[in-house]
Amino acid sequence: MIQKTYDVKGMTCDHCVQAVNSELSSLSGVANVQVDLPSGKVTVTSEQPLDHAAVAAAVDEAGYELVDEEAQ
């Protein structure tokens, strides 16, 4: 299993957590999603490495923004 942590901007409440969790959990191969609301950190456990664009699209679909560490 592979675990990766992402920064997500815009989450402010439990509904935000549920929306992000739901969208990321629907990605193929995802086994677990843990959202830490105060820090904006989302840890995803998956069977294989996830496509960064797919993760960004799922977070966007939930209504939030993935902080793109690859661009930094």
Image: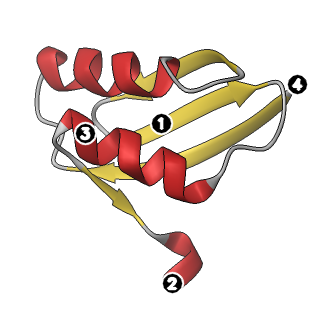
The three-letter amino acid code for the residue at tag 2 is: Ala
User: Residue at coordinates 37% horizontally, 25% vertically from top-left?
Assistant: 23
Q: Is residue 35 above or below residue 54?
A: above
Q: From the viewer's perspective, is the residue at label 1 or at label 3 nearer?
A: 3
Per the rendering, the mark at residue 42 is 1
Residue underneath mark 4 = 1
The three-letter amino acid code for the residue at tag 4 is: Met
Q: Residues within 10 Å of mark 2 (few under 14, many from 20)?
A: few
Q: Earlier in the sequence, mark 1 or mark 3?
A: 1
Q: Marks 2 and 1, Cα distance to the nearest angstrom?
A: 18 Å
Q: Earlier in the sequence, mark 2 or mark 3?
A: 3
Q: From the viewer's perspective, is the residue at label 4 or at label 3 nearer?
A: 3
Q: From the viewer's perspective, is the residue at label 2 or at label 1 nearer?
A: 2
Secondary structure of the residue carrying tag 4 is loop
Q: Marks 4 and 1, Cα distance to the nearest angstrom?
A: 16 Å
Q: Residues within 10 Å of mark 1 (few under 14, many from 20)?
A: many
Q: Marks 1 and 3, Cα distance to the nearest angstrom?
A: 15 Å
Q: Marks 4 and 3, Cα distance to the nearest angstrom?
A: 25 Å
Q: How many marks?
A: 4
Disc 1 and disc 3 in contact, CB within 8 angstroms: no
Q: Is residue 6 left or right of residue 28?
A: left
User: In x, y percent, where is residue 27?
Assistant: 55, 26
The three-letter amino acid code for the residue at tag 3 is: Glu
Disc 2 and disc 3 in contact, CB within 8 angstroms: no
User: Residue at coordinates 44% horizontally, 42% vertically from top-left?
Assistant: 41
Residue underneath mark 3 = 61
Residue underneath mark 2 = 71
User: In x, y percent, where is residue 65?
Assistant: 26, 55
Q: Marks 2 and 3, Cα distance to the nearest angstrom?
A: 20 Å
